Image: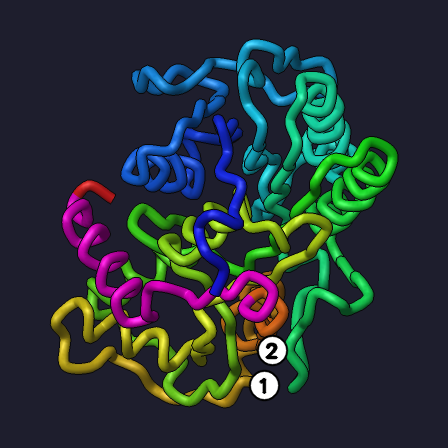
Amino acid sequence: MLSLVEHRMPDKILVTGASGFVGAALCAHLDALNMSYVGSARQASGLPSRVLVGALTAQTDWSVALSGCDVVVHLAARVHVMDDQSSDPLSAFRAVNVDATLNLARQAVRSGVRRFIYVSSIKVNGEATHGTPFTSQDQPAPLDPYGFSKLEAERGLQVLAQETGLELVIVRPPLVYGPGVRANFQRLMQLLRKGIPLPLGAVHNRRSMVGLDNLVDLLTVCCSHPRASGEVFLVSDDHDLSITELLRSLSFAMGKTRPLLFSMPAGVLTGVAGVLGKSAAASRLLGSLQVDIAHTRTTLDWVPPASVDDSIHKTVAHFLSLADRL
C-alpha cells in the first residue's frame, strides 16, 4: 500500500454535475473528508459550495468555477435515455459529451488544472458480454449514440493530454445504484414492493453493477493517486449478480421472505419483448454484462469498500422511506 505522503492531495476539486445522482454523493463524501471542492450545476441547489454555471455547451465560461482548482471530476453529461426523441441523437450527444467536455478541459489546462478525471461509461466497451468480462484494454465497441459520444470524448481528451501534459484519468462505470437511484432499478423496486409476480425466476445472466459508495470512493482515490494518471479504469462491486439474484436480494432487504417470481424461458421473454418493442430493455434484464476490475484493483491498491448486501440495503431503505411519494 502507498503511504499518504506519496499521494499529492488536491488543493481544490471542481465537481461538475454536482446536483446529479453521483455528483451530489461525491460532494457529500468530499465534505466528510474535509477536502476543498466546488461543485457546478445548471440550476441553483442552495449549497454554498456550488457555482451556478448554466448549460453545458462548447461556449460555457468555466473561469469562475475553475478558479483555484487543480483537479476536475467531470460528471456532467447528456445521459443515456430510453426512447430518445431527438431527431439526431448522435449530434445531440456530441454537442454536450464531446464538444462541451473538450471546452471544459481546454479551459482547465489554461487555468492550471493538473488532473482531469473523466467519468465515461462501460457502453464504450459495448452492450453485452458472452462469458468473457470487459477489460480496460479491450478494443472499444460502442453500439449506440451515447456510447459513441463517450468514446469520442475519451479520444479527444487523450489527444489534449498528450499535447499539454494534463493528467487524464478515465473511469467507465456500469449501472450505478444507491440511495436515490431511478430508472429501471427504481421500477424493479416498485414492482417488488407491490408484490407483482415477475417471470424472472430462472434467469442465469451475470451483471456487474457498482454501488454509489464504491464509485464515489474510487473517484476520490483517483483525485490523488500517483499511478492513476493516463489510465482507463473499469469499476464495479466486484460481485456480479443475475437478475434473479438481484430481485431476491432486493426483496430480502424489503423484509419480504421471497419475491413473487415464476420461471419463463429467456427465449420466450426475449420474443415477447421484441413484439412489444422492448428489446433493448429485455437485453438489460436478461443479457450479461460483466467487467473485470483487476487492473483497477492492482494499479490503485483499491478494494470496493462497500459490500453488495450493504449497498442494496441502503438503496432499499432510502426507497422505502420515499416509496409513498414515488
Q: Amino acid at mark 1?
A: Gly
**Can you identify the residue that label 2 sits on?**
271
Image height of 47 relative to 231, above or below? above
**Can you identify the residue that label 1 sits on?**
267
Bounds of the magenta span? 297-324
Q: Residue at x 30, y 16 (%)?
A: 46
**In the drawing, does residue 294 fall left or right of residue 39?**
right
**In the drawing, does residue 320 fall left or right of residue 196?**
left
Quarter assignment of residue 299 = bottom right
Tell me where residue 236 appears, x and y as whole percent: 49, 66
Q: Residue at x 43, y 77 (%)?
A: 239
State the mark number for residue 40: none
Tell me where residue 290 appears, x and y as whole percent: 58, 74
Tell me where residue 237 appears, x and y as whole percent: 44, 68
How many other residues sit within 10 Å of disc 2, few (<14), some (14-19) or many (≥20)? some
- Comparing 290 with 187, the one in front is 290
Q: Residue at x 43, y 27 (%)?
A: 37
User: Dots 1 and 2: beta carbons under 8 Å?
Assistant: yes
Q: Secondary structure at mark 1?
A: helix
How many other residues sit within 10 Å of disc 1, few (<14), some (14-19) or many (≥20)? few
Image height of 221 relative to 42, above or below? below
Q: Secondary structure at mark 2?
A: helix
Query: Is 93 contained in the magenta span?
Result: no
